[in-house]
Amino acid sequence: MGRSRGVQGTRMAEEDEDSRLALRAAAGDGGAFGALLERHYARIHRIGWRLLGSAAEADDLAQDVCAGLAARISGWRGEAAFTTWLTTLTLNAARDRLRARGRRVARDAVWAETDALARAGSEARAEETLWLHGALAALPDGLRETAVLVLDDGMAHAEAGEALGVSAGTVSWRMSEIRRRLKAFAATEEGAVR
C-alpha cells in the first residue's frame, strides 16, 4: 500500500510539474517548452512505434507532434492532465498516418520491430514476443490502441479512456475483450498445431 501511494505521489508531482511547464510554454517560455519536449519525447516516440510499426515512422511522427505542439500548446487549458492531452494529440497524429497509408499496409507493418526483439531475446521469449505482437496486430484499431496505452504505456483505465475519448468502463471492457480474443487466438493456434 505504501509503494502504491509513493508511485501515485510521484505521478501527481510529475503532472504538477508538467502543468507548470505547459502554462509557461503557452505564455511563450521557450525553456519550459524545451523541458516539456525533453520529458515527453520518448513517450511520443514509443506510442508512435507501437501503433505505426517502425522506428522511422515513429521518428517522423514524434517530429510532427513536437513541431505542431508549439502552435497547439496555447490550446491546452488544464482540464485534463498535460500527459493525457499530449497522448491524445499523439494518437490522433498516428491515426492520421494510418489512414493516409491505408489499413491493409498499416496492419502488416504494425509491430514490425518484433523480428529485432525476437533475435535479441532467448528463443522461448522471442517466440512469445512474436506471438503476442502478431496477436495484438490482428486486433481492431480501438482495441490495439487501448492495449498500447494500458499494457505498454502503463496508463490507468481512466487516463487511457480520457486520451481515447471513451469512458474508463469502456477501457475496462476493451481490456476484457483483448484478454478474451488473445485466449481464443491461442486456443485456435493450439488446435491447429495438434
Image (spheres, grey):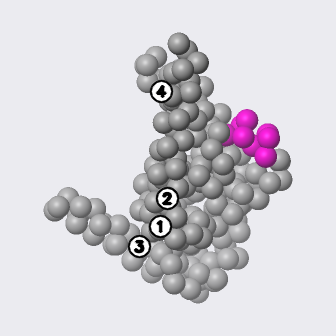
Image quadrant holding the N terminus, namely bottom left
Label 2 with label 1: CB-CB less than 8 Å:
yes
Q: Which residue is most to the left?
A: 2
Q: CA distance from mark 4 to mark 3?
A: 35 Å
Q: CA distance from mark 2 to mark 1?
A: 6 Å
Between 171 and 77, the one lying in front of the other is 171
Q: Which residue is mark 2?
A: 173
Between 159 and 6, the one lying in front of the other is 159
Choose mark 2 or mark 4, whichever is in front.
2
CA neighbours of label 3 inside 10 A, class few (<14), some (14 to 19), many (20+): some
State the image coordinates of residue 130 (x, y, percent, origin top left): 55, 27
Disc number at residue 128? 4
| Point 76% across, 59% down: residue | 96
Badge 3 or badge 1: first in the primary sequence: 3
| Point 56% across, 27% down: residue | 188
Q: Secondary structure at mark 1?
A: helix
Q: Secondary structure at mark 4?
A: helix
Q: Main secondary structure of the magenta part?
A: helix
State the image coordinates of residue 84 (x, y, percent, origin top left): 52, 69
State which region is magenta: 103-110
Callout 2, which amino acid? Answer: Trp
Callout 4, which amino acid? Answer: Glu
Q: Which residue is mark 1?
A: 169
Q: CA distance from mark 2 to mark 4?
A: 24 Å
Disc number at residue 15? 3
Choose mark 3 or mark 2, whichever is in front.
2
CA neighbours of label 2 inside 10 A, class few (<14), some (14 to 19), many (20+): some
Badge 2 or badge 4: first in the primary sequence: 4
